[in-house]
Amino acid sequence: MPSYAFFKKKFIPTSEAKLGILTHALHYGTACFEGIRVNWNSDDKQLYIFRCPEHYERLLNNCKMLKINIPYTVDKLCSLTVNLIQKSGYKEDVYIRPLAYKSSEALGVRLHGLEDDIFIVVTPFGPYLDADNGIKCCVSSWIRPDDNMIPARGKITGIYVNNALAKTEAIENGFQEAIMLTSDGYVSEGSGENIFLVTDGKLVTPGCYDRILMGITRDTVIQLAKKELGIETIERHIDRSELYLANEVFLTGTAAHITPVVEIDHRKVGDGKIGKLTKKLQKLYFDVESGRNKKYLHWCTPVYSKQAKGRKTRAEIG
Ligand SMILES: Cc1ncc(COP(=O)(O)O)c(C=O)c1O
């Protein structure tokens, strides 16, 4: 069965979805995108899309920043996504990549006077980082752009050159992920993840002022820590040296789930093993995102049931 893409307002086999070489977004990075995980639950024989409306809410906000007009509501984008996965017939973990872009085949740096479009593709997707054993990170020599350079909260394709430079530098130097700082020297985020520290039993994470993407996994962790473990998260600036002194450090992201960091800049984090709180949060998060924790089923959109079509948005659930 071929994998399908939603492309130019139609579902077509992914292999047939092609863009012209003059497409504006390809030249100038004038696009924004999302990454959404869809998790196979073998007990329920069901695929669950995790926090689908929240991803599309973020995408539409980012479209506003880039002056991209998409003729779809959050609900419509969610139902297109459900239809796309059904059509492709997956029964394994997959990843959804919606990308809204300046689609005119025209040269010239600008945002105005151009056509817009969106495509959505689906692809099988396994682990991104080694969440089971933990990873080694370095502090990157590349810094996060300030908000008045390219807004980091935007998930804008063009800004990802910054992330790619940091990631490749980290890999080539023998680490698995980069941790970037802001121009003020505060801890910002990984190349595709937010960061949390556990210090004296408290969770600490940088706020939006530290040039981060406001992650949906980050929000999930903050909510689960509070509601399930009674632990508040403190949002504040974090100094680089705090990374070396934290008891536990972990990264969060749709692709990365919750990935423990066991070493930073050749210094062990805590005792160099995966921390207790990190482990607890990993287990909680796994159960929630795969639809095994029924208390949080409102965050999971089922793909293969009638419910999927009439799913309520977050606003309707309240
Ligand atoms: C730069 C960056 N930060 C953080 C995240 C985590 O965001 P989310 O949890 O919404 O996937 C991502 C991944 O999308 C990212 O690319």
Image: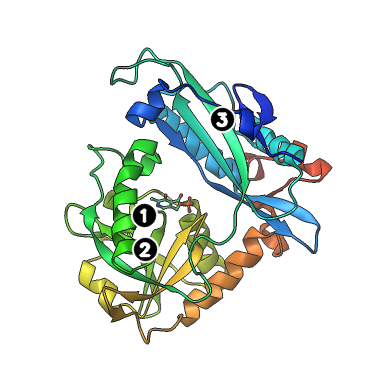
Query: How dense is the environment of label 2, judged by Cα within 10 Å: few (below 14), some, or many (20 and up)?
Result: many
Categorize mark 1 by other alpha carbons within 10 Å: few (<14), some (14-19), many (20+).
Answer: many
Of residue 199 and residue 170, the one placed in the foreground of this image is: 170
Q: Does dot 1 land on a helix, a strand or a loop?
A: loop
**Callout 3 amino acid:** Phe
Q: Disc 1, disc 2: CB below 8 Å? A: yes
Q: Which residue is mark 1?
A: 191
User: Is residue 43 rendered to the left or right of residue 241?
Assistant: right
Residue occupied by mark 2:
177
Look at the picture and state if 27 lies above or below 108.
Answer: below
Q: Does ligand 1 reach within 8 Å of label 1's beta carbon?
A: yes
Mark 1 residue type:
Ser
Q: Earlier in the sequence, mark 2 or mark 3?
A: 3
Coordinates of residue 300 in the picture (x, y in percent): 67, 51
Q: Earlier in the sequence, mark 3 or mark 1?
A: 3
The reply to whether dot 2 and dot 3 touch (C-beta < 8 Å) is: no
Helix, strand or loop at mark 2: strand
Instruction: Report whether residue 123 is seen.
Output: yes
Q: Which residue is mark 3?
A: 119
Q: Residue at x 73, y 40 (%)?
A: 88
The location of residue 295, given as percent across then percent down, is: 69, 61
Callout 3: few (<14), some (14-19), or many (20+) C-alpha neighbours within 10 Å? some
Mark 2 → mark 3, Cα distance in angstroms: 29 Å
Q: For marks 3 and 1, give the CA distance.
A: 24 Å
